[in-house]
Amino acid sequence: MTSWLLLAEAGATAGSPEGGLFDLDATLPLMAVQVVLLTYILNTLFFRPVGRVVEDREGYINTSRAEAKQKLAQAERLEADLKEQLKEARVASQKLIQEAEQDADKLYRQALAVATAEAIASREEARREIDTQRESALTQLRADADKLGDLIVDRLLAAK
């Protein structure tokens, strides 16, 4: 349908001498100058500043992404370092705990040995003291038995 309209319009304009496809008056060059001038004005006033802002934004985004990647890598390195330090601290604390347990066990065994030795020495001392007292009691008992025996013999002899 549009082609019929174009043909009808072309037929209507064919009868008029002006307004053909290419008029040789100043309209076509003036329109070309207007397009070039408008393109230049839009380029200087709109496209270049907008392009500059877009490029600046892209640069900012790229630098921000690069910084974020660096910070992420640094954070991962720090995390790995801290995990390693934590592992080393755990190993060191376990070692200290084992050493403390061994020292405590050693001190316990030493104290037990000292207490056992003191108990044995005290028991030996008590046994010697008991033996001494028993010997002195036996000696006293023999002396008393001898006196009593002499007294009985004296009384028996005196009674006769």
Image (tube, rainbow, N blue to C red):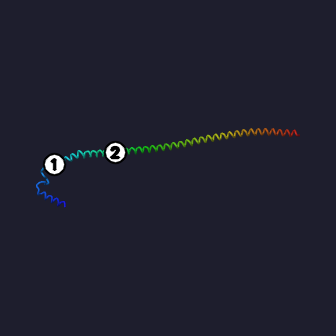
Q: How many other residues sit within 10 Å of disc 1, few (<14), some (14-19) or many (≥20)? A: few
**Tag 2 residue:** 64
Disc number lying in front (1 or 2): 1
* Number of on-image labels: 2
In the displayed structure image, the side of residue 79 where residue 5 appears, left or right: left
94 or 149, nearer to the observer = 94
Residue at 21% across, 45% down: 41
48 or 74, nearer to the observer = 48
Residue at 47% across, 43% down: 89
Q: Is mark 1 on a helix, strand or loop?
A: helix
152 or 90, nearer to the observer = 90
Q: Is mark 2 on a helix, strand or loop?
A: helix
Q: How many other residues sit within 10 Å of disc 2, few (<14), some (14-19) or many (≥20)? A: few
The mark nearer the N terminus, 1 or 2, is 1
Amino acid found under the numbered disc labelled 1? Leu
Q: Quadrant of residue 140?
A: top right
x, y percent for residue 29: 15, 49
Q: In which quarter of the image is residue 104?
A: top right
Amino acid found under the numbered disc labelled 2? Ser
Numbered circle sitting on residue 107: none
Q: In which quarter of the image is residue 19?
A: bottom left
x, y percent for residue 21: 14, 54
**Tag 1 residue:** 30
Location of the N terminus by quadrant is: bottom left
Location of the C terminus by quadrant is: top right
Whole-Å distance between the Cαs marked 1 and 2? 48 Å
Q: Do the residues labelled 1 and 2 touch (CB within 8 Å)?
A: no
Relative to 18, is 108 above or below? above
x, y percent for residue 2: 19, 60
x, y percent for residue 142: 78, 39
In the displayed structure image, the side of residue 45 where residue 99 appears, left or right: right
